[in-house]
Amino acid sequence: MHELSITQSIVEAVLDRTGERKVTVVNLTIGRLSGVVPDAVRFCFDLVADGTPLAGAELRIEEPVGAAVCRSCALEFELADPIPLCRCGSADVSILRGRELSVTSVKVL
C-alpha cells in the first residue's frame, strides 16, 4: 500500500512547515488519475498523525477529474479512469489534469 508512505510524506511536509503548532485541518488535492486512493489516505492519516500536532485534524480531500486532449482529432474530454482513450478511438492523447497530488492548505491554531 503506497498510500501509507505517501501519507507519511504529507504529514512530514505539514510538520516541516507548521512545527509544533496544533493543526486542525489539512486540505489535499488528489487527482483521479494520480493512482492514489483517497480513502486509503484517509485511513492512513489518522494512524500516521497520531502522537503529532496533526492528531485529530480534519482531512479534506478534493478529487478533481482527469482531462485530456486527443492528438488525432483535437477533442478535449474528461477522463474518469486512467485509460486514456478518445471517442474517435485514438489512444494518442495528452493528459491535461487529474494527476495532482498536493497539500493545498492547512489550518493551525
Image (cartoon, grey):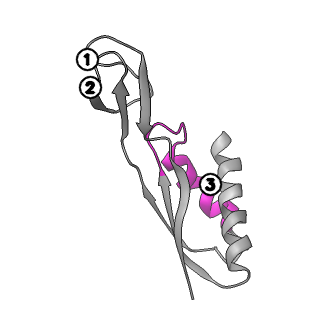
Q: Residues within 10 Å of mark 3 (few under 14, many from 20)?
A: some
Can you tell which of label 2 and label 3 is closer to the viewer?
Answer: 2
- Name the residue that disc number 2 marks: 75
**Real-space CA distance between mark 1 and mark 2, rounded to the nearest whole angstrom:** 9 Å
**Secondary structure found at label 3:** helix
Residue at 35% across, 12% down: 90
Name which residue lies at 69% across and 74% down: 17
Q: Quadrant of residue 93?
A: top left
Local secondary structure at mark 1: loop
Instruction: Tell me which amino acid carries mark 2.
Output: Leu
Pointer 1 or 3: first along the chain: 3
The reply to whether discs 1 and 2 touch (Cβ–Cβ < 8 Å) is yes
- Chain-order first, disc 1 or disc 2: 2
The magenta segment is 30-49
Q: Measuring from the top left, give residue 43's x and y in whole percent.
A: 57, 54
Instruction: Locate residue 66, reporting x and y percent.
Output: 38, 38
Measure how far apart labels 1 and 3 are at the Cα level.
37 Å
Residue of label 3: 44
Q: Earlier in the sequence, mark 2 or mark 3?
A: 3
Mark 1 packing: few (<14 Cα in 10 Å), some, or many (20+)? few
68, above or below 72, in the image? below
